[in-house]
Amino acid sequence: MEKKIKAWQGWLLFAGSMIVVFVLGMLAASINERRAEIVTIFNNKKTEIKGIESRNELFADNYPREYNTWLQTADTSFQSEFNGNQMVDVLAQRPDMVILWAGFAFAKDYSTPRGHMHAVEDIIHTLRTGAPMSDTDGPQPATCWACKSPDVPRMMQSLGVENFYKTKWGALGSEIVNPIGCADCHEPENMNLQISRPGLIEAFERQGKDIKKASLQEMRSLVCAQCHVEYFFKGDGKYLTFPWDKGMTVETMEAYYDESDYADYTHALSKAPMLKAQHPDYELSQMGIHAQRGVACADCHMPYMSEGGVKFSDHHIQSPLAMIDRTCQVCHRESEETLRNNVYDRQRKANEIRNRLETELATAHIEAKFAWEKGASEAQMKPVMKALRAAQWRWDFAVASHGGSFHAPQEFQRILGHGLDNAMQARLSTAKVLASLGFSGDVPMPDISTKEKAQAYIGLDMATERKQKDEFMKTIVPEWLKKAKANNRLIVKN
């Protein structure tokens, strides 16, 4: 009996070894096949690309599938319950935001973002960049171009990073002409993922991290984190900087800014030193369950697709709700309707607090203005301004993020909840100041029920703003394009 058992054990060991050899052989064959496929792709390149190549069209022949899906980022047809790919005037929808940004360019113009193909076009059209009529004119530095085009790393290499940031925005209008594309995320020679913007690399270095050690899966988020983050323009040189030195939460970034008494602007009504959040998408997403489970940005926003037996990433970067069968349902087995409603439910609940907070903040700024007019002192208003700064930073941090209410719903609502508490504290402090000045009634509220009324209330001359922008679009922008074509910065299409 013992001999039979040993014989069976020997046979099983042999069979197991054969299976292992077979599996390893299959894996080796698969790897070799993939290597051969890669070699074939690169040996059959129709266009040789070296260095920083910002003209996206030159990548089309070598990577037609990726390129053709990237072209679709021009599509504006998708619409969800709250947002889509179309440009929507948010200030018209929520006029309180005009009051929140009084004294800052966002009070003039703020629309929902469109696809990457529209990046250069939209920053040129927005009223926030003004109407520079010369290379030394205009309100914004070249730092505003930083995330809009693969021409940016090319110009950083040409001018030097510091000089690039110091330059006026309008001075580079004939150079920054190609929309977000291939060289922003890929090494042109081999299409490996790369970090092309210094801000992210420098943020890692200040934290004692080496971004070169990031895994491929991490890189599938980090290439997005080059731009989809909170940042500010540091110092007189307007050097683009990520405020991550103390951490990536709303509180640690606030502490970073507070340490240097930094403010993006002084509020035109309340006089509070304000912070303006950009779009902390990466930071908030890292606090959510998907990132904690190792899901990358590209897994949901650039899902795989197949064509002719070839598997590749869909470069039509957009909301995962537009393609639930290739995003959510890869992991989740619920119906499209159920998964879509799961997202909407989180957004609806978050928006309840968001709307309440916007109303409280607008009221708080107007009440603070009234207190100043009644003769309040700096010392009396200090608690009011501190609470307003904290409240609006939290509101903006949440609202400026793309998809934050889904990426990290608990953190998103926690931030808004704390913002609402700070806004109420600001209003209570103002009421105490007014009481000490002998005023105990209700502060009179202006009619800010529309964008136009709110803009007029804070003193904006929108007719002049639009007239200047129209003149800029008619005279300066065509010259930019003419010069770009003459210098071969753009592919001229027949």
Image (spheres, rainbow, N blue to C red):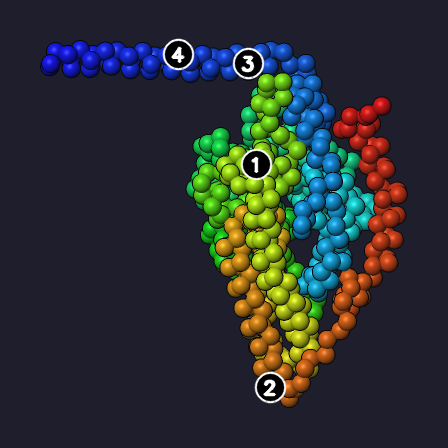
Q: Which numbered disc flags the more N-terminal residue, 4 or 2? A: 4
267 relative to 479, above or below: below
Q: Which numbered disc flags the more N-terminal residue, 2 or 3? A: 3
Q: Which numbered disc flags the more N-terminal residue, 3 or 1? A: 3
Q: Which numbered disc flags the more N-terminal residue, 1 or 4? A: 4
Instruction: Report the residue at 50% width, 12% height from top.
Output: 33
Which marked residue is nearer to the observer: mark 3 or mark 1? 1
- Where, by quadrant of the figure, is residue 100 drawn? bottom right
Which residue does the numbered mark 3 point to in the structure image? 37
- Quarter of the picture containing the C terminus is top right
Residue 467: image x %, image y %? 87, 53
Badge 1 marks a residue whose secondary structure is loop
Q: Is residue 295 left or right of residue 131?
A: left
Q: Which numbered disc flags the more N-terminal residue, 4 or 3? A: 4
Which residue does the numbered mark 1 point to in the structure image? 327
Q: Is residue 338 left or right of residue 88?
A: left
**Mark seen at residue 25:** 4
- Where, by quadrant of the figure, is residue 359 drawn? bottom right
Look at label 4 and name its amino acid.
Answer: Gly
Look at label 1 and name its amino acid.
Answer: Thr
Look at label 2 and name its amino acid.
Answer: Ser
Which residue does the numbered mark 2 point to in the structure image? 436
**Mark seen at residue 411:** none
Which marked residue is nearer to the observer: mark 2 or mark 1? 1
Question: 362 or 485, which is in the foreground?
Answer: 362
Q: Which numbered disc flags the more N-terminal residue, 2 or 1? A: 1
